[in-house]
Amino acid sequence: MRKYFIAGNWKMNHSISETIEYCRQLRVKGLKNISSDIVLFPPSISIQSMMKTLEDTPVKIGGQNMHQESDGAFTGEISSEMFADSGCEYILIGHSERRQYFNETNELVNKKLKKALGSNLKPVVCIGEKLEEREAGKTSDVILEQLKNGLKDIAKADMQNIIIAYEPIWAIGTGLTAKPEQAQEIHSLIRNVIKNDFSEHLGKNLRILYGGSAKVKNAKSLLSEKDIDGLLIGGASLKVDAFYKIIQIAENLTIN
Ligand code: PGA
């Protein structure tokens, strides 16, 4: 049985002190009986403070990006082993901002993915099309390409630890959300690819998150779609009230 997965991608937002305050408030709101998976992706510098402030709560923590090597002369980078050692359980891989501003390709995503799995991190692999690709009717082609190359040579045993986030680039940070049925169409495509390329069981159990201006107002309609198993929330996760409200929305829905 799949559980909802509600994740907050903070990107380059919130200082350490703001993080501590946010997490204190989140605790006060009540996290005890939460059954969904809740994950926060703060800037790496805040991971330890977040971990301490959220100790003994079900909230898990992840890194926003990692380097594909274990160690070495890569100034400014952090390895998967370091994230795992810091207590992180998850890692974002291939976020569209990494692809757009840091030239990450599907090939690099694939390398990072294998490295993350080798370090026992659970990767959340982000895919999604640009506006011009959607307008040219190429959405499915782009998604298929990203899955084919991003998941190249991934073992079946590893696939069960991978989460996919469908994030149409035109919806990220723009206030434009994909219509629930538009997102559902792509989520269903993604699930079918995993069923065909890996196994029926892995496809059925795969968790596919939607990301792109997900917020309190649209969380219920998105999460009600058959193949939408959770949300990867940027802007709306920065405010503890909004993030908590979305958690409550997921808690009150039953997954299909
Ligand atoms: P957004 O970001 O919710 O601010 O659109 C989502 C994401 O980039 O993961």
Image: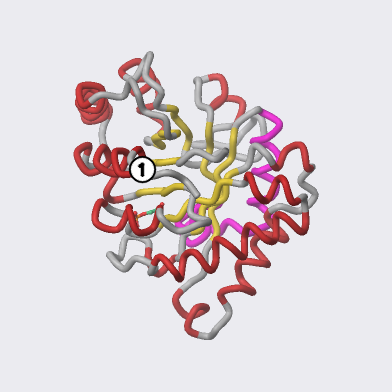
Residue 174's place in the image compared with 203, above or below, is below
Residue 250's place in the image compared with 119, above or below, is below
Residue 59 lies, in percent from the top left, at: 39, 26
**Residue placed under numbered mark 1 in the picture:** 250
Main SS category, magenta section: helix
**Horizontally, is 216 left or right of 83 in the view?**
left
Foreground pick, 65 / 233: 233
- In which of the image's four quarters is ligand 1 placed? bottom left
On the image, which quarter does residue 161 sit in?
Answer: top right
Q: What stretch is highlighted in magenta?
A: 94-119
Residue that appears at 55% across and 40% down: 2
Residue 147's place in the image compared with 12, above or below, is below
Residue 195 lies, in percent from the top left, at: 72, 55
Residue that appears at 47% across and 46% down: 255
Residue 8 lies, in percent from the top left, at: 37, 42
Residue 118 lies, in percent from the top left, at: 71, 31
Query: Of the residues shown, which amino acid type is indicated by label 1?
Result: Ala
Residue that appears at 57% across and 50% down: 164
